[in-house]
Image (cartoon, helix red, strand yellow):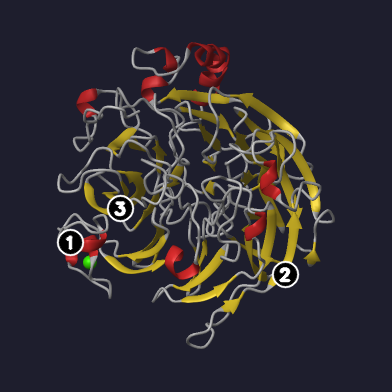
């Protein structure tokens, strides 16, 4: 899929029910008063302008089978006709809503008529499986009907291996007729997108045992359970000390899977117990065999964990794997062209590297734990490749490090040690950023944990505009259809025009924290809160009677749920 959004801002579809009237003022509106006032200042002129700019655009109709653009990781989509506002209470522009668990930190992917999203088991779909679990749910793309789920027991070694109720945080990757996923137990899994409904396929046959905690009686899978084809245990096979949670979006390149390992510090946060474990590994996608690993000895310098997933670049026609380590360094590796002989594990060849924070401490880094002024930097978002450049957010760890953070632009055409020389510009962010940038039309959009979103000139790093928001931004933005969608930990979705001038189109308060990134596929926008997955499409009228019959009504939340 080659998705390009370097096109001029286009006209926005305007559904009849709010053409010419302030759509935030209705009884079902979820817009906060301050936001409403800001919107009111521009509503009249916008309405007059847009009223003349119909008809509706048609949807493009492409799947979104991985997190970000394949495989630049750019947070852009070529989908059109996406809603600039929606109202879940009234059903306006809402195709369906699916209940998730009580915490959802993953981003949905959409492929082959199905939507896959990681969550927890806070609201059990299967009464046989109760208690904290990692869960991957699969829904029908058109109706939101629940199809099947993967249930993965928690690691009980300590909370710092597999954080309670965090669920499966990793986004899935769909490639052909396979779903690839990293579970909360640090297992790389290959799943059948059709689940058990078509039988138990693949060499893995012990799903019954795998779905329950060790030592408990196996539960035989039914038609609404996942079908694991193979799995590779990174903790067992690679000696990884996963920290807090496994978080990885698998990159598929030819027959290979590139997977970051989530290797990190121990419970004290002041020691690396697996200094020799890999940060990046490569598996054969057909069999799960380990065929390559990095040889960079990143372990001792990992300040917290290894949560950034690799991107694929094509630099002057040459493919490169771009990987951001838990040490704040961006590495470029040569992609594998063939598997090593049976029994051997190849070492990835480094092409260049760039230390994003070269003056930060490099030795005994964990003594700077909890130092908010001086600490190493790390990278939790994904590096984005665009136009021979890498865009990355980097800085002190949100929980344990300094408050300094930046959006950086790196020249990807260098070789060897590119630290310093490859820096095109650095733009200051606040209190770290988990947000993978969206680069489109010569602009870079990103949010930070300092409660601000930014539009920056991609060439110079100078800001076009910023906007204060009501919560930390953990989600990545999405640029699509001439708009940029931001989501906050306070539960707001903010929609701006993706232009150099700041134009806030709408703000919707979903009343529930948002970690997952907005995505678009087949003309539909997906927004994921802690507890619900919203499928949003332009042109669905504001009327409860016209709300989709398949809408999944939220059930009562258990005690302690958000
Ligand atoms: Ca099957």
Counting from the top left corner in percent of width and height, residue 534 is at 35, 36
Q: Is residue 423 visible?
A: yes
Q: Earlier in the sequence, mark 3 or mark 2?
A: 3
Q: Earlier in the sequence, mark 2 or mark 1?
A: 1
Residue of label 3: 153
Image quarter where ligand 1 lies: bottom left
Of marks 3 and 2, the one in the foreground: 3
Closer-to-camera residue (504/358): 358
* Callout 1: CB less than 8 Å from ligand 1: yes
In the picture provided, is 422 more to the left or to the right than 120? right
Instruction: Identify whether 342 is placed above or below 482.
Output: below
Q: CA distance from mark 2 to mark 1?
A: 45 Å
In the picture provided, is 410 more to the left or to the right than 534? right
For the residue labelled by badge 3, is the local secondary structure a helix, a strand or a loop? strand
Residue of label 1: 197
Q: Quick one: label 1, few (<14), some, or many (20+) residues within 10 Å? A: some
Residue of label 2: 351
Residue shown at 70%/55% (left/top)?
329
Closer-to-camera residue (185/501): 185
Q: Quadrant of the C terminus?
A: top left
Task: Classify residue 27 by image quadrant.
Answer: top left
Q: Are marks 2 and 1 in contact (CB under 8 Å)?
A: no
């Amino acid at each position: 899929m080659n998705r390009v959004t370097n096109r001029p801002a286009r006209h926005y579809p305007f559904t009849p029910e709010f053409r010419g009237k302030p759509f935030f003022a209705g009884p079902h509106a979820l817009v906060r008063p301050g936001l409403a006032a800001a919107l009111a200042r521009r509503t009249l002129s916008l309405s007059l302008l847009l009223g003349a700019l119909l008809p509706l655009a048609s949807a493009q109709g492409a799947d979104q089978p991985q997190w970000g653009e394949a495989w630049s990781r750019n947070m852009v989509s070529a989908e059109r006709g996406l809603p600039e506002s929606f109202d879940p209470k009234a059903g306006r522009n809402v195709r369906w809503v699916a209940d998730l668990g009580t915490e959802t930190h993953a981003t949905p992917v959409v492929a082959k008529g199905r939507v896959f999203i990681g969550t927890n088991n806070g609201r059990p779909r299967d009464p046989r499986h109760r208690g904290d679990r990692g869960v991957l749910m699969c829904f029908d793309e058109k109706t939101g009907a629940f199809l099947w789920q993967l249930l993965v027991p928690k690691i009980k070694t300590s909370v710092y291996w597999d954080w309670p109720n965090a669920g499966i945080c990793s986004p899935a990757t769909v490639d052909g007729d396979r779903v690839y996923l990293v579970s909360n137990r640090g297992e790389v899994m290959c799943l059948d997108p059709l689940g058990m409904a078509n039988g138990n396929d693949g060499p893995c046959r012990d799903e019954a045992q795998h779905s329950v905690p060790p030592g408990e009686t196996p539960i035989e899978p039914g038609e609404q359970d996942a079908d694991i084809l193979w799995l590779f245990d990174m903790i067992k096979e690679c000696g990884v000390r996963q920290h807090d949670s496994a978080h990885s979006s698998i990159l598929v390149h030819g027959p290979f899977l590139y997977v970051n390992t989530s290797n990190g510090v121990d419970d004290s946060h002041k020691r690396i117990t697996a200094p020799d474990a890999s940060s990046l590994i490569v598996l054969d996608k057909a069999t799960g065999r380990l065929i390559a690993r990095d040889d960079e000895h990143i372990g001792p310098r990992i300040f917290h964990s290894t949560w950034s997933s690799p991107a694929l670049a094509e630099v002057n026609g040459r493919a490169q794997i771009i990987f951001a380590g838990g040490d704040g360094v961006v590495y470029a590796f040569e992609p594998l062209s063939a598997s090593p002989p049976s029994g051997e594990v190849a070492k990835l060849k480094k092409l260049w590297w760039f230390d994003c924070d070269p003056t930060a401490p490099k030795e005994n880094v964990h003594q700077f734990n909890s130092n908010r002024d001086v600490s190493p930097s790390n990278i939790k978002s994904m590096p984005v490749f665009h136009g021979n450049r890498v865009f990355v957010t980097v800085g002190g760890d949100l929980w344990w490090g300094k408050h300094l953070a930046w959006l950086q632009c790196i020249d990807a055409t260098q070789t060897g040690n590119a630290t310093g020389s490859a820096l095109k510009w650095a733009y200051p962010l606040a209190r770290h950023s988990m947000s993978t940038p969206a680069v489109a039309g010569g602009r870079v959009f990103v949010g930070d944990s300092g409660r601000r979103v930014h539009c920056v000139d991609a060439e110079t790093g100078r800001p076009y505009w910023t906007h204060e928001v009501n919560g930390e931004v953990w989600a990545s933005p999405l640029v699509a259809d001439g708009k940029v969608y931001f989501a906050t930990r306070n539960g707001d979705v903010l929609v701006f025009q993706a232009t150099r001038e700041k134009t806030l189109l709408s703000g919707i308060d979903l009343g529930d924290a948002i970690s997952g990134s907005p995505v678009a596929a087949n003309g539909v926008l997906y927004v994921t809160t802690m507890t619900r997955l919203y499928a949003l499409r332009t042109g669905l009228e504001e009327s409860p009677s016209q709300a989709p019959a398949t809408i999944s009504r939220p059930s009562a939340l258990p005690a302690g749920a958000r």
